[in-house]
């Protein structure tokens, strides 16, 4: 991206993604004025919660990874998922072509992803940076075709075109407990009035 655009990754993302999506609290390096908003990371031990260090450290960072390192909030992540749900458009601004989102949300690896960590990935395919529900019984309340990804500490975001839902869940636990994800998605599905 930097080579083609001749723009540093953080500036490119700010100009081409974060600003058009009204993502005002998404950073590689959280400004000092915003640090107080960061949620601490905790681990459960013997019925109590203990603070944990951040996976990537606290920065400031000079290398901006495309595979991790962003800090964001539920509002910003929801705007991103709404854009994907709307086939690349957000509040009248087009960030991606519908064909790009369609390509992104198709399984490109056959059963390789489903077989990767079977108790977690079974029933899912892998597209361009997202997992895709292929078996609704394994989708924990998501419909076939729902796509998204989880981040560090229990972050989970997805778009579900069939149910017309964009969702974000943030936990901030290390390790993230497995059941809240499925409980959350099942509660959303149960709340839908058909």
Image: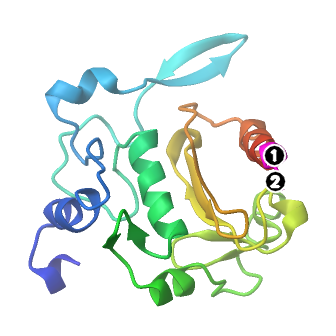
Of the residues tagged 2 and 1, which is closer to the observer?
1
Is residue 33 toward the left or the right of residue 54 in the image? left
Q: Position of residue 6 (x, y in %)?
A: 9, 79
Give the labeled residue for mark 2. Answer: 140
At 17% from the left and 40% from the top, the residue drawn is: 60
Indicate whether residue 192 is drawn in magenta. Answer: yes
Q: Secondary structure at mark 2?
A: loop
| Residue furthest right as drawn | 137
Query: How far apart are the two marked residues, 2 and 1, measured between alpha carbons?
Result: 6 Å
Look at the image and give the residue range highlighted in magenta. 190-194
Whole-percent x and y of residue 85? 54, 67
The label on residue 81 is none
Tag 1 residue: 186
| Residue visible at 65% across and 20% down in the picture | 44
Disc 2 vs disc 1: Cβ atoms closer than 8 Å? yes
Magenta: main secondary structure equals: loop
- Residue 26 is a magenta residue: no
Q: Nearer the viewer, residue 94 or 133?
A: 94
Q: Secondary structure at mark 1?
A: helix
Query: Is residue 84 or residue 110 the one in the foreground?
Result: 84
**Label 2 vs 1, first from the N-terminus:** 2
């Amino acid at each position: 991206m930097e080579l083609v655009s001749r723009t540093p990754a953080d500036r490119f993302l700010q100009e081409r993604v974060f600003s058009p999506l009204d993502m005002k609290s998404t950073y590689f390096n959280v400004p000092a004025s915003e640090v107080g908003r960061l949620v601490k990371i905790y681990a459960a031990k013997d019925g109590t919660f203990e603070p944990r260090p951040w996976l990537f450290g606290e920065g400031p960072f000079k290398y901006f990874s495309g595979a991790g390192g962003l800090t964001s909030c539920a509002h910003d992540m929801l705007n991103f998922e709404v854009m994907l749900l709307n086939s690349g458009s957000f509040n009248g601004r087009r960030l991606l072509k519908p064909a790009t989102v369609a390509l992104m949300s198709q399984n490109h690896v056959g059963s390789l992803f489903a077989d990767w960590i079977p108790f977690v990935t079974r029933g899912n395919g892998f597209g361009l940076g997202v997992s895709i529900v292929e078996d609704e019984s394994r989708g924990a309340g998501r419909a076939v075709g729902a796509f998204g990804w989880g981040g560090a500490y229990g972050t989970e975001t997805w778009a579900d075109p069939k149910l017309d839902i964009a969702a974000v869940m943030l936990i901030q636990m290390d390790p993230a407990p497995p059941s809240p994800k499925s409980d959350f998605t099942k509660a959303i599905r149960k709340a839908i009035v058909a």
